[in-house]
Image: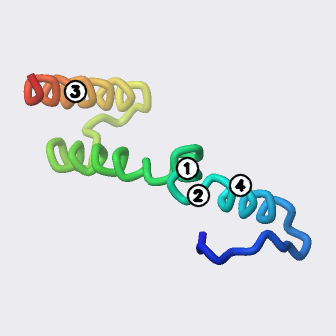
Amino acid sequence: MRRNSVPRSRGCYVRKRTVEEFLSLGRAGWSRAHGYGMRWAAEGLFSALKRIFGEHVMVRKFANAAKELLLKAAICNSFLMAMYR
């Protein structure tokens, strides 16, 4: 959202409310309140998982795919825990 946004709305009440909140909290406060900018952490983790294990699962059944992904996540978590000890 731009700094010079105005809360005038032409039929869009949600935008008006968002602009008013943005102007009252400021950019940093609004970002913290709405979790803006948190997507990069999840995207980074997914990228790391793909680099380590590849982009595909090796099984055919959905239940087994879920188990495989849980195992891959557990292994990745153990890597991270060992790295940050």
Task: Name the residue beneath numbered marker 1.
Answer: 29
Looking at marks 1 and 3 on the same chain, the residue that comes earlier in the sequence is marked by 1
- Badge 1: residue crowd in 10 Å (few <14, some 14–19, many ≥20): some
In the image, is 49 to the left or to the right of 25? left
SS at mark 2? Answer: helix
The residue sitting at 19% across, 31% down in the picture is 76
**Disc 4, disc 1: CB below 8 Å?**
no
- Residue 22 in which image quadrant: bottom right
Looking at marks 2 and 4 on the same chain, the residue that comes earlier in the sequence is marked by 4
The residue sitting at 43% across, 32% down in the picture is 62
**Disc 1, disc 3: CB below 8 Å?**
no
Looking at marks 3 and 2 on the same chain, the residue that comes earlier in the sequence is marked by 2
**Disc 1, disc 2: CB below 8 Å?**
yes
Task: Name the residue beneath numbered marker 3.
Answer: 77
Task: Name the residue beneath numbered marker 4.
Answer: 21
- Residue 71 in which image quadrant: top left
Note whether 83 is above or below 38 in the view shown: above
Residue 50 position in % (x across, y down): 23, 48
In the image, is 3 to the left or to the right of 74? right
Looking at numbered disc 4 in the image, what kind of residue is underneath it?
Answer: Glu
Task: Name the residue beneath numbered marker 2.
Answer: 26
Looking at marks 4 and 3 on the same chain, the residue that comes earlier in the sequence is marked by 4
SS at mark 3? Answer: helix
For the residues labelled 1 and 3, the Cα–Cα distance comes to 31 Å
The residue sitting at 17% across, 42% down in the picture is 53
User: Looking at the image, which is closer to me, 82 or 46?
Assistant: 82
SS at mark 4? Answer: helix
Residue 5 position in % (x across, y down): 69, 74
Which circle marks residue 45 in the picture?
none
Note whether 72 is above or below 17 in the view shown: above
Looking at numbered disc 3 in the image, what kind of residue is underneath it?
Answer: Asn
